[in-house]
Structure formats: structure tokens, C-alpha cells
Amino acid sequence: MLRSAFRVTRVSSRLPIFSSPTLSLARRYLSQETRSKIQDAVSATPVVLFMKGTPDFPQCGFSRAAIQVLDLHGVPPEKMKTFNVLEDSELRQAIKEFSEWPTIPQLYVNGEFVGGCDILLSMHQSGELEDLLEKKGVIPPVAEESQAPGSPNTGTSSA
Amino acid sequence: MPVSLSDLEAAIRNAIPVAHLEIDDQSSGCGENYAVLIVSEAFEGKSTLARHRFINEVLKAQIAQMHAFSQKTFTPKQYEAYLQKSS
């Protein structure tokens, strides 16, 4: 039974989130420090996408699809933040443990994990994604639908 | 190590009753990139996210060895509706 070797790489100092070299030792489990850094990141902006590459240059078909779907729904740039896991191998591993989800991309809306590319695509097709983004105040509701303005029934569902 | 299709199938069938199962090796036979479609009554009452997490757990060891994995999950009734829509 072959166990895949853990590649312990030296952490570069220009990491967007993680700048502590001791993290390379703590690779096999998620430290409290890392956990709270990610928690902060996913709560700081309404829409947070962990992807491969950047919105302008996605490096993977699934990440590209995720960005395109969010773009289709008109998520305003100031309400969205993306993290390129290819630039940050610590994050790439840590986010999988944090979300308990094995693949990238990963979408968070208002601090809550929504899913990966296939979930995103099927929610898009079913209209669920639009509903979610409207309900969470990321995009304005379609004009004729909403009769009563200001029905902010946004339940705080914590992750 | 690449993941074998039969390995995936066995793991899924061992975990839940399967009404219909499609496993697609999207890496042209390299066993690195799989898309699965699972129809099972075990999904009844579970949200999409819950279903996906459940399957992620069932296939945890295999997914860890893949480069990419995607899934579609349906209850038997949902699958019928899905087939109707696509025909």
C-alpha cells in the first residue's frame, strides 16, 4: 500500500495569507492559526472563491467555469474576492481541510461553503444560484419579482 | 497511482443502494479525472451539498489520488425528471 509522500516545501514569504514558515511543519493538520485566517478570509467578503489561477487567467477548466458562472450573474467585483491556490501551496492544502472538500474551486457566500464547480453549475441551471445571490444581497433582485422591498430575511446560517 | 473504474464502482455500490450509475473517465483512460452520476434512494431528503459530501467521504481514498472529480446525484424520481428534460 503506497502512501503518497507529503511534499514539504519551504514557504515563500510572499504568500497572500500565510507568512509563517512554521506552517510547513504543520502540514498534516490544520492549525488553529491557519483555521482562523481562512475563517477571516471567507467572512471578509460576500463572495469568496478559491480557484486555480485568477479570474482573468484561470488555470483549470473547472475554475474557469466557476468564474464564468459568477460573472454571468453579475457579481460586482467589490463583493468578490478570489484566491489563487496555485500561488499558495499551503492554502491549497489548508482550504481542503478547512472546508472538508477535496477539490478546487470552492465557493463561499457570506462565510458559508456553497460547493465546487459541479454544484455551482447545477445551481445555476436550476435558478438556485440566482436565488442565493439575491437573498444574500450580492446581486439586486429582478425588478418585477420583488413586491416588498427590504425583506431582509437573511438567516445567519453559520458554517 | 491511477484509480480504477471498478474500484470506484465497488466503493459506491458497497456504500449505498444504486439504481443507476455512470462513471466517466475523463482523462482518456488515465484514471485521473472522473465524473460520476449516481442515482440512489439513499439521497432522498439530503441537500445537494450533503449528498456530495457523503460521496466525497465514501470515495475519500480514491479522490485523494485523482486530479479531478465531479459528481451528479439524483434520487430515482429526480433522475426520471432529468431524463425527461434532456430528451
Image (cartoon, coloured by chain):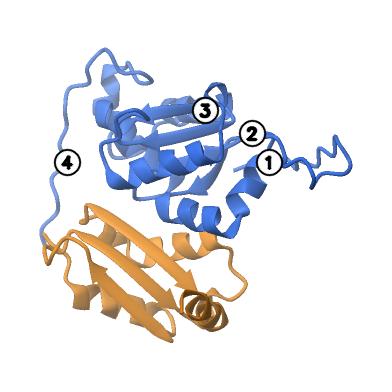
Chain colours: A blue, B orange
Say which element carries label 4: loop
Q: Secondary structure at mark 2?
A: loop
Q: Nearer the viewer, mark 4 or mark 1?
A: 1
Question: Are dots 1 and 2 in contact, CB under 8 Å?
Answer: yes
Spatial separation of the CA atoms under disc 1 and disc 3:
14 Å
- Sequence order check, earlier mark of 2 and 3: 3
Quadrant in the picture for residue B44: bottom right
Q: Residue at label 2?
A: A138
x and y percentages locating residue A154 in the rendered image: 75, 40
Sequence order check, earlier mark of 2 and 4: 4
The secondary element bearing badge 1 is classed as helix
| Residue at which label 1 appears | A134
- Which mark is drawn over residue A159? none
CA separation, marks 1 and 2?
6 Å
Q: Earlier in the sequence, mark 4 or mark 1?
A: 4
Residue shown at the point (53%, 58%) measured from the top left: A125
Using the image, determine if residue A24 lies above or below residue A14.
below
**Residue at 63% over, 41% down:** A133
| CA–CA distance in space, label 4 to label 1 | 42 Å
Residue bearing the label numbered 4 = A6
Q: Is residue A98 visible?
A: no
- Judge if badges 2 and 4 mark residues of a common chain: yes
Residue located at (29% from left, 30% from top): A57
- Say what secondary structure mark 3 lies in: strand
Q: Earlier in the sequence, mark 3 or mark 4?
A: 4
Mark 4 belongs to chain: A
Residue picked out by circle 3: A80
Residue A48 screen position, x and y as percent: 49, 32
Q: Earlier in the sequence, mark 1 or mark 3?
A: 3
Name the chain under label 1. Answer: A
